[in-house]
């Protein structure tokens, strides 16, 4: 009896829309995580939307839970802990990772968020994605990031956190190149 070869599942291309979540405590110490496959590449939480209709805020919370084990609901974070900066960075996808996207896709749109957590919030890494973590004062964290857009977001953290009162949600989105 002849059998057809088993189909090999090919992962769907990643969407060129992602989130960046700068996780920090009240003293503006920032959580950085080191990529498992690229030692020395320190970053905040990042990840692509799973589907085109996934809201970026939902993707941000999902990625935080997947990459750090921090579950905002379980951590008893208040409703304002996740802040949408209304900022979308546009940047060229690193050649190293372009094979994950559809042919011809070379730009990504990254929605920026911050998440304030209590000091000493425990971190449980996804070992498949990350190998180490550390909390650093925001200036040191920005200097440690391999990604320019991530470093720039961390540099904005003090102003964004302090300025997130009345009217801050109306801040227009800005593209960075």
Image (cartoon, rainbow, N blue to C red):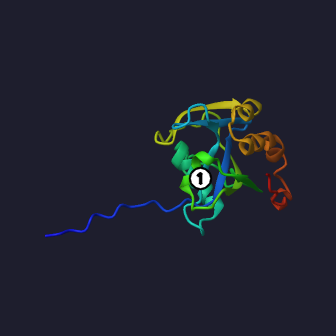
Query: Secondary structure beneath disc 1?
Result: helix
**Mark 1 highlights which residue?**
98
Q: Which residue is drawn at the image coordinates 74% and 39% (left, top)?
A: 151
Work out which quarter of the rendered image holds the N terminus and state it.
bottom left
Q: Which residue is drawn at the image coordinates 69% and 41% (left, top)?
A: 147
Q: Which residue is drawn at the image coordinates 52% and 44% (left, top)?
A: 69
Of 53 and 114, the residue lying toward us: 53
The picture places residue 23, in percent across and down from the top left corner, at 66, 43
Q: Quadrant of residue 26?
A: top right
The picture places residue 20, in percent across and down from the top left corner, at 67, 49
Q: Which residue is drawn at the image coordinates 43% and 60% (left, top)?
A: 10
In this rendering, would 146 be left or right of 64? right
Q: In this view, does 50 lie above or below 24?
A: below
Mark 1 is surrounded, within 10 Å at the Cα level, by few (under 14), some (14 to 19) or many (20 or more) other residues, namely: some
In the orientation shown, which residue stands out farthest toward the left? 1
Of 73 and 102, the residue lying toward us: 102
Of 85 and 42, the residue lying toward us: 42
In this rendering, would 80 be left or right of 64? right
Number of marks in the rendered image: 1
Q: In this view, does 45 lie above or below 107?
A: above
The picture places residue 58, in percent across and down from the top left corner, at 60, 60
The picture places residue 145, in percent across and down from the top left corner, at 69, 36
């Amino acid at each position: 009896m002849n059998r057809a070869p088993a189909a090999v599942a090919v992962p769907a291309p990643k969407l060129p829309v992602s989130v960046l979540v700068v996780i920090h405590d009240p003293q503006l110490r920032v959580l950085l995580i080191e990529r498992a496959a690229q030692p020395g590449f320190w970053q905040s939480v990042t990840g692509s939307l799973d589907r085109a209709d996934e809201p970026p805020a939902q993707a941000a919370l999902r990625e935080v839970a997947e990459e750090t084990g921090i579950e905002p609901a379980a951590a008893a974070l208040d409703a304002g802990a996740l802040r949408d900066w209304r900022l979308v960075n546009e940047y060229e996808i690193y050649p190293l990772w372009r094979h994950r996207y559809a042919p011809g896709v070379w730009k990504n749109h990254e929605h920026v968020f911050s998440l304030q957590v209590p000091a000493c919030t425990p971190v449980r890494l996804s070992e498949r994605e990350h190998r180490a973590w550390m909390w650093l004062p925001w200036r040191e964290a920005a200097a440690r990031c391999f990604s320019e857009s991530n470093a720039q977001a961390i540099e904005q953290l003090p102003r964004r956190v302090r300025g997130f009162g009345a009217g801050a949600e109306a801040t227009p989105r800005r593209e960075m190149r």
